[in-house]
Amino acid sequence: MPESLAQQYFPLLVQILLAVLVAGGMVAAGLLIGKKVKNRVKEMPYECGMTPTGNARERFSVKFYLVGMLFILFDIEAVFLFPWAVVFRELKLFAWFEMVTFVVLILAGFFYIWKKGALDWTQTETSKAHKPPTALDLMLSDELEVAGRR
Amino acid sequence: MIPMPNLDVLGFLVLATFAVLCGLSVILQKHAVASALSLVGVMGSLAVLYLMLGAEFLAAVQMIVYAGAIMVLFVFVIMLLNSGSERPAKARYFAYLVGIPSLLAFLGVISFFILKELPNTSSVQFGAFTQGGPAPVGRLLFTQYLLPFEVTSLLVLIAIIGAMVLAKKEID
Amino acid sequence: MDFFLVSLIKIVVVFGAFMTTLAYLQWVERKVLAHIQLRLGPQRVGPHGLLQPLADVIKLATKEGLIPANVNTFFYILAPFLAVSLALISIAVIPFGPEIELFGVRTNLELTSLNIGVLLILAISSVGVYGIALGGWASNNKYSLMGGLRSSAQMISYELPMTIALATPLLVLNTLDLRQIAERQGGGWFWNWTAFSYPPLLFIAFIVFLISAFAETNRVPFDLPEAENELVAGFHTEYSSLAFAGFFMAEYANMVTITCVSTTIFLGGWHPPFPAPYSNFVPTALFWFFGGVLLFHGLTQPARRWDRFTFPAFGVISLGLGAIFLLAATVLPIIGQILLPVFWFVAKVGLLLFLFIWVRGTLPRFRYDQLMRFTWTFLFPVALGCLLLTGLGVALFG
C-alpha cells in the first residue's frame, strides 16, 4: 500500500516515461523505417491532386479567439467546482448558496454573450459583407492566383 | 520511503533548470508558436514544482488553467494573426548595452538575498506537507477565504463582458 | 523494495493489456461497423481477420515517413509525439479492482491512486489539444489547419460541460481519488452507482458526460476535424506512416481512457450490478451461453467454409473461459479476487466502447455551427443546472 506522496507519484512517473518512450519510438521509427523517394510533386501540400493555391496559413474568424477566451473564463469557474464538491457535505446548504452566488454572476455574463450572438456560428448576410475575402472568394474572383509553390 | 535524501534537491534542480531553459526559449525563439509552446513548458515544470512542494491541487489547476486554457488561447491568437517569424529590430546594440548589465545587476541582487537567507532554510521534503490536496484547499477556500472566491466571479464577469466588447467589432 | 517491484510489474501488465486493447479495438470497430452495414469487415488476415492489427502495424511501419515541403519540421514531428504520449498517461490512475493479496503481498489493482486523480485526467485531456492544433498548423495545408482549429475549438468547448458533469457525482462522493470514488459506490445493487442515485439528475449528468466524451475524442457525430467530405482527413491529412498511426492510436487510447473514467465515476467501477455470491456466476453463464451458441451455429449451419472450424474453436475457448471463471468464483478465490472485479470493469468499459462504435455506425455528422451551438447553449446550461440541483438535493436530503 502506498503511504507517502513519493510512493503515490512513482508509478505515474514511470508511466509518463513509458508513454514518452513509446511515443518517441513510434514517431522516430515512422520517420526512419521505409524507403525514401523524394520529389517535388510528392512533397506538395495535398489539395485533392490540384496545384495548391494561396497560402495555407490563413487568418481565421475571430470566433475562435472568442471561444478560447470564454473557455478560460468558464474553466476558472469549473475548476473551483472540484474542491467545492469535495468539502460539500461538510458545509451543506452554506456551500450551496456560496456556489449559487458565484454561478449566478457568471451566468449573467453567459446570457450577455448569448444575447450578443457570440455563440451563434451561422453567418448572416450582413456579417459576410464586412468579412475579409476567404480563400474561396479569392479563387472565384478575377485575381486568380496560380501559385505553384511558395 | 525513498532512501536517497537528496532526491528532492535533484528533482528541484532538474525542473528548475528545465523551467529556466524554457523561459529563455520563450524570448529567444524566432517563431511565435515556438515561444508559446516554450511557455507551456514553463507552466508544466512549475506545476511539477508545486507538486513537489505538496501543493497537489494547485499543480493540477496550474496544468488545467494555464497550460490547458490560457496557452491554448495564446496559440489560437498566434494562428489567428498568422504572424510569421519575427525579424530582429534595429536598435539591437542599445538593447545589449543596457539589457545585459541590468540583467547581471538583477541576478546579483537576487543571489545576494538568497545567499544571505539560505543558511537559515532547509530543503523541502516531498510529501512532508500534506495539506495541499483538494479537501484542505476547499475547506479554507469556502470558509476563511470566501470573499476572495466570490469576488473572483465578479472579475470573471467583467472579463467576459470585456472579451465580448473587444471581439464585437470583428464579428459585426 | 517490494513496493517498487510490484509497481513495475503492475505497470508492465497494464501497459501490455492497454496496447493490445488499442490494437484490437480497431479490429472490433471495423467488424462492428461492417456488420451494421451488412458487410463482413476484415476477413483475409488470419481467421476472421484477427491478425489484421498486426498486418496494419507492419504495413504502416514500412510506409515512407514523408515530411512534405514547407512544413515546420519540428512541430510537424512534435504533434503526433505529444498526442500519443499524453493519451497513454491517464490509464495510470484508473482502478481496475479492489485491494488483493497475492503471495503475501497486498496491493491495489491499479497503478496508483492520487488525491487529485480526477483533476489529473482533466489536466491531461486539456493539454491534449496541442497535439491536434499543432499537427494541423504545422502541416502547411488548408485542410489540416481548418481541421486543427475546428478540433481545438470543439475540444475546449466540450471540455466545459464535461468538467461540470464530472463534478456533479463528486458532490455525492466527496473525493477526487478514483479508488475511493469506486469504493464508495460498492455495497450491493446497481442503484448505489452514482449514475442511478438522485434520479434522474445524475443520470442526466452521465449522459452529458458521455456526449462530451464523444466530442473530446473527436468521434462521430462530432468528427468534424476529420470530416472527410469537406476536409479530406482534417488535421492529419499530411501525415503518413507511423506518425499517422500515432494519431489514430491516440484517438483510441483517449476513447479507452474516457470510457474507463465514466465506468469508474458513474457506473460503480469494478462492482457487479447485484450482490456478490450470485453475481460471481454471471461471467460463467455468459461465457457458456456464447460458447454454446458458437458451437451450435458452427457445427449445424456454417455460412462459410472456414466457419465449420473457427466457430467451434472460439466456442470451446469460450466454454473454457467460463470454466475458469466458475473455478475462480468457487474454489480458487486467489484468482477470483483478480478475475471477477476485472471482468465487471472490462464488461462495463466494453459496453461503453461498443456504444461509441454503434453511434458511429448510426448517426450522421453535425454541422459546425450546430455543434458549437449545441454545447454552449444546451449542454453547458443543462450540466450547470444539473449540478446545482444535485447540490441542493445532497444538501437537503444528505
Image: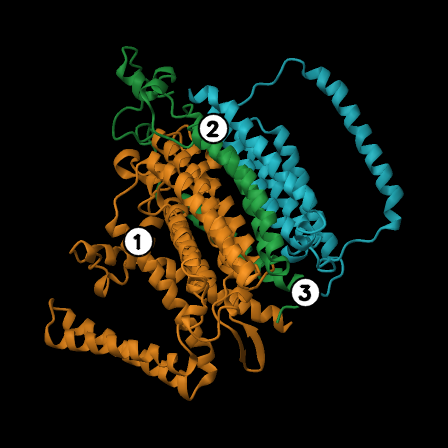
Marks 1,2: beta carbons within 8 A = no
Which of the 4 quarters of the picture holds residue C20?
bottom left
Marks 3,2: beta carbons within 8 A = no
Position of residue A129 measured from the top left corner of the image (x, y, whole percent): 34, 15
The Cα–Cα distance between marks 3 and 1, rounded to whole angstroms, is 43 Å
Asked if marks 1 and 2 fall on the same chain, the answer is no
Letter of the green chain: A
Kindly report which numbered mark, 3 or 1, lies closer to the viewer in this rendering.
3
In the rendered structure, the answer to whether residue C348 lies left or right of residue A48 reads right
Circle 1: residue type: Asp
User: In the image, which disc is placed on residue C56?
Assistant: 1
The Cα–Cα distance between marks 1 and 2, rounded to whole angstroms, is 34 Å
Q: Colour of chain B?
A: cyan
Please tell me whether mark 2 sits on a helix, a strand or a loop. Answer: helix
Letter of the orange chain: C
Return the residue at label 3.
A4
Q: Nearer the viewer, residue B147 or B65?
A: B147
Circle 2: residue type: Met
Please tell me whether mark 1 sits on a helix, a strand or a loop. Answer: helix
Chain letter behind tag 1 = C
Chain letter behind tag 2 = B
Residue A1, visible in the rendered structure = yes
